[in-house]
Amino acid sequence: MNNTSSSTVISLTDKGQQLATRLVALGVATHHQHKPKPFADQVQTLFSSGERLILICATGIAIRTLAPVLADKYKDPAVLVLDEHGQFVIPLLSGHEGGANDWGRQVAQVIDAQLVITSAQTYLKPRYIAGMGCERHCPMPVLRQLLEETLLLSNLTVDDLSAIASIDVKQDEVGLIELAAKLNIPFHTYSAERLRTVENQLTQKSDIVYREVGCYGVAEAAALIDASSLFNNQQTTPELLIPKHKNRQATCAVARIYES
């Protein structure tokens, strides 16, 4: 998934330029380009570098411009399309995986526009679970820093989390317990046997981790299992939103499930 904190607004008309300036001032975008030349080359270069884009233009222009450089929903950055009057916000690409839907909600809210989402499950509320693993006695500040850095990859904060999950050998890990308490969310742990039930969904499998704790991964598996356990009355299944990220002492991943 390519979803960076940097984003660029592209405008083509005078009214669009005014809206773009407003978006940057409101903090929902970081850069603005007006009538870049050559237009297609500039937009495609930004997109291919992983830059999130807000295109203030017709959807047809956006589609024709980006079509030659599209990869897939796991790699393409989020793209929003707005009309020059700022009445509608359309998440065009990478709605779920790239965070365009959530970003679109943010933009629509701050400019009082109508969000137009065409992807599935738009009537459901997303819930986010952080799965974490760590060395014994890893300090809480180290865990929190990794958690915040991981969440930022999908423009999330700790306030978006419903719980933190890990393997049962970490049920007495002070740093994880303190972190969950600090964030006022539950901390759940699961057996290695339970975590192995989702090993086919892991993006990374570690033989070293398996030898140590009996499953191929902790962070990703714990996030998926906890999301399913917390919201098992729903008709949706959890998905791995952010694959495992790590520092020298800990690992973190984020799962998402939709709740009605």
Image: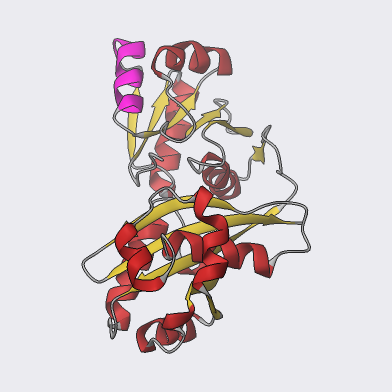
Q: Nearer the viewer, residue 108 or 219?
A: 219
The quarter of the image holding the C terminus is bottom right
The quarter of the image holding the N terminus is top left
Q: Is residue 47 magenta?
A: yes
Instruction: Name the residue rendered at 43%, 89% in the picture.
Output: 172
- Where 226 sits versus 22, above or below? below
Choose top left, top right, bottom left or bottom right for residue 179: bottom left
Instruction: Name the residue rendered at 34%, 19% in the picture.
Output: 44
Residue 210 at x, y percent in the picture? 37, 64
- Where 231 sits versus 3, above or below? below
Q: Which residues fall within the magenta stretch?
A: 37-48
Q: In this view of the protein, can residue 17 be seen by the observer?
A: yes
Residue 126 at x, y percent in the picture? 63, 55
- Where 185 sits versus 253, above or below? below
Q: Which colour scheme appears in the figure? A: secondary structure
In the current view of this chain or complex, which residue is farthest to the left? 248
Choose top left, top right, bottom left or bottom right for residue 149: bottom left
Q: Nearer the viewer, residue 224 or 38?
A: 224
Instruction: Name the residue rendered at 33%, 58% in the picture.
Output: 207
Instruction: Name the residue rendered at 57%, 68% in the picture.
Output: 194
Left or right: where does residue 51 sit relative to residue 257? left
Q: Is residue 231 magenta?
A: no
Q: Main secondary structure of the magenta part?
A: helix
Choose top left, top right, bottom left or bottom right for residue 24: top left
